[in-house]
Image (cartoon, grey):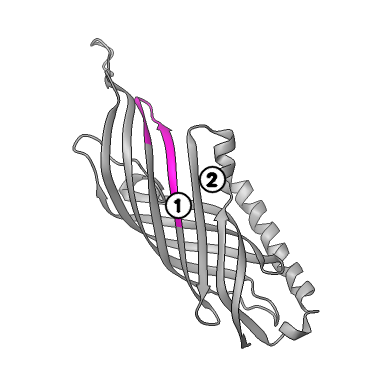
Amino acid sequence: MKLLPMLKYTINVILFLVSFSAISQEAEVEEVYKDRYGIRLGIDIIQPIYSLFDDHKKGLEIVGDYRITKSLFVAAELGYNDTTSYEDYFNFTTNGSYIKFGADANIYKNWIGMENMIYVGLRYGFSVFNQTLNEAVINADPFLPLETLSEPAHYNGLNASWISLVFGIKAEVLHNLFLGFSVSGNKLVSSKEPENFKNLFIPGFNKVFVNNNGFGFNYTISYLIPFYKKDH
């Protein structure tokens, strides 16, 4: 898979930035014994990049977290997606919005003055969306006349929910500015489907694989708005 070398390269770069930020932040004496608490807001940059090169994929995701203890953060993602998917005998368009919320636990032991993260987290996701079956081969039997869908079929008012296990990295590359990367394994909990069409793609969940499993990833840039500080 072409994705694996890119993921490996990204992880190596972010781990390097984690180490680099540790050295640069040692000079900030006034911050040595203080941890910042506040809200961190950002966006997933991969979806807008996809939109530039693929007219069939459009979307935006806003990410955020809020620190409640030294290593525990509440977190959420909010977004929308408009994607056309192509299968062997049909293609369909999915558009809708989603929200994912849960918590992250930082398992990285920072040096004094650092606030980087290597974390694991849990999410509950919910999406409302529409599906449009654009084209389909109704009869693909080579011994019978070929039949195709006469006009697009629209399925509105659909929804789905799922749970996700998340692993990610966030590194402070400039003061209050973080770059991050995360991967998630998704498991579908519920899915409202039309009688004659299965939900094969769900905004926020992505492609639905066998046994209602899914996979997601993002690259984020975010900014920390500190509200107060606590002793380390």
Q: Is the magenta stretch mostly helix, strand or loop?
A: strand
Coordinates of residue 154 in the picture (x, y in percent): 27, 32
Mark 1 residue type: Gly
Q: Mark 1 points at which residue?
A: 79
Q: Residue 163 carries which label?
A: none
Closer to the eye: label 1 or 2:
1
Residue 141 image position (x, y, % from top left): 26, 17
In the displayed structure, 231 sits above or below 208; it is below
Q: Quadrant of the N terminus?
A: top right
Q: Quadrant of the C terminus?
A: bottom right
Mark 2, residues whose alpha carbon is within 10 Å: few (<14), some, or many (≥20)? some
Q: Is residue 231 left or right of residue 186?
A: right
Residue 5: x and y in percent read: 63, 47
Does 61 sit left or right of 23 as displayed? left
Most extreme residue toward the left, as rendered? 195
What range of the chain is rendered magenta? Answer: 78-93
Secondary structure beneath label 1? strand
Structural crowding at the residue carrying mark 1, measured as other residues with C-alpha within 10 Å and reported as few (<14), some (14–19) or many (≥20): some
Residue at the spot of label 2: 47
